[in-house]
Image (cartoon, helix red, strand yellow):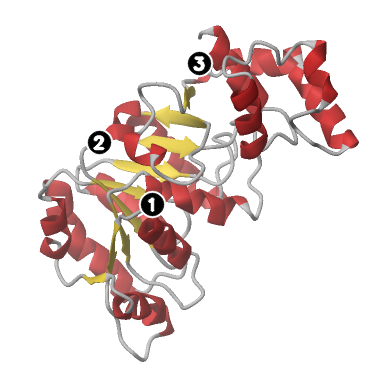
């Protein structure tokens, strides 16, 4: 690991250091040559409250954090920075792309040729299950890699159905790879770490916080050429992912549902707003031909 990469990863582990703080430091010191120097301690560019600044300094001079970073390789965890050639090109296009991706599994999946985000309700219905089982075999057969969030419901079925059909899948999680949530999906995550891929923008020992979940949705859509919403209520988090996809200029697909079902209210609204109605896998595949 070169000196710049190690410094950036170390900085990323410091409490209180946000995406914007790293951006400010890189603008003034592109090689991060001075971050360990006393001159940096002026807090000139970070503008952090004094307690947060002192906390960040403590972490920046922590040998324990450096040792932790060096041990990631032993646990088959790879840190890919925004400046590395392996960093996904599509993800670079989004607003505030993650400075670091912490991944475990098959890194080649990050730059797969055809990636489709599949998200939906945590309370998946039998209709949603049947929709996924109907759509996935042709999608997987055409080399589509499935991206989802390892949450309950649609996400869980999307990952497992992709693998069951012999395909590839990426799980974008809210916390670090040492803290898989929900706990019942830990066996699925461990299986994916062997032959698929788990991705997080947070250091491995980060416990998931409530705000991490909607924030990670920008990565799910950002990695993908298009986003499919299977089932969603009107206030579903899946609609956040769809909005990110729209803002990123990516295709949005939606499975229609009964006008009497609250689980389809969000997807039906998306179709009214211009999302592509999906009846068969061909409705998605024709957008992946170019």
What's the mark number on residue 73? 3
At label 3, counting other C-alpha atoms closer than 10 Å, the crowd grade (few under 14, some 14-19, many 20 or more) is few
Q: Are marks 1 and 2 in contact (CB under 8 Å)?
A: no
Q: x and y percent of residue 174 in the render?
A: 55, 46
Looking at the rendering, which quadrant does residue 252 occupy?
bottom left
38 sits to left or right of 254: right
Asked if residue 148 shows in the view, the reply is no
Residue 53, relative to residue 264: is it above or below? Answer: above
* Residue plotted at (82% across, 12% down): 38
Q: Are marks 3 and 1 in contact (CB under 8 Å)?
A: no
Q: Nearer the viewer, residue 194 or 67?
A: 67
Residue 59, relative to residue 223: is it above or below? Answer: above
- First in sequence: mark 3 vs mark 1: 3
At label 1, counting other C-alpha atoms closer than 10 Å, the crowd grade (few under 14, some 14-19, many 20 or more) is many
* Residue plotted at (37% across, 53% down): 248
Q: Which residue is mark 1?
A: 221
Q: Nearer the viewer, residue 129 or 247?
A: 247
Looking at the rendering, which quadrant does residue 249 occupy?
bottom left
The residue mark sitting in front, 3 or 1, is: 1
Q: CA distance from mark 3 to mark 1?
A: 27 Å
Q: CA distance from mark 1 to mark 2?
A: 14 Å
Q: x and y percent of residue 230 in the render?
A: 32, 67
The residue mark sitting in front, 2 or 3, is: 2
**Residue extending furthest toward the top:** 2
- First in sequence: mark 1 vs mark 2: 2
The kind of secondary structure element at disc 2 is loop
Q: Which residue is mark 2?
A: 112
Q: Nearer the viewer, residue 99 or 103?
A: 99
The kind of secondary structure element at disc 1 is helix
47 sits to left or right of 152: right
Q: x and y percent of residue 215 in the render?
A: 55, 52
């Amino acid at each position: 690991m070169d000196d710049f990469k190690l410094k950036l990863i170390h900085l990323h582990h410091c409490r209180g250091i946000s995406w914007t703080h790293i951006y400010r430091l890189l603008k003034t010191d592109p090689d991060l040559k001075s971050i360990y120097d006393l001159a940096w301690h002026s807090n000139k560019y970070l503008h952090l409250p004094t307690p947060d600044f002192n906390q960040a300094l403590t972490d920046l001079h922590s040998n324990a954090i450096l040792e932790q970073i060096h041990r990631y390789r032993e646990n088959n965890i790879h840190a890919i920075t925004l400046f590395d050639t392996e960093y996904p090109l599509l993800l670079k296009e989004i607003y505030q792309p993650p400075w670091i991706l912490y991944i475990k599994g098959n890194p080649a999946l990050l730059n797969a040729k055809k990636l489709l985000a599949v998200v939906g309700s945590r309370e998946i219905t039998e209709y949603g299950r049947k929709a996924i089982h109907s759509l996935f075999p042709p999608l997987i057969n055409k080399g589509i890699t499935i991206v989802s969030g390892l949450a309950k419901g649609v996400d869980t079925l999307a990952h497992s159905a992709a693998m069951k059909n012999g395909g590839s899948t990426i799980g974008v999680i809210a916390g670090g790879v040492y803290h898989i949530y929900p706990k019942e999906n830990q066996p699925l995550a461990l299986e994916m770490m062997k032959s698929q891929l788990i991705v997080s923008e947070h250091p491995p020992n980060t416990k998931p916080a409530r705000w991490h979940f909607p924030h990670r949705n920008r990565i799910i859509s950002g990695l993908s050429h298009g986003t499919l919403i299977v089932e969603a209520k009107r206030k579903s988090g899946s609609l956040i992912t769809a909005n990110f996809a729209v803002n990123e200029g990516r295709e949005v697909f939606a499975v229609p549902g009964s006008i009497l079902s609250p689980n389809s209210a969000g997807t039906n609204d998306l179709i009214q707003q211009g999302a592509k109605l999906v009846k068969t896998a061909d409705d998605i595949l024709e957008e992946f031909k170019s």
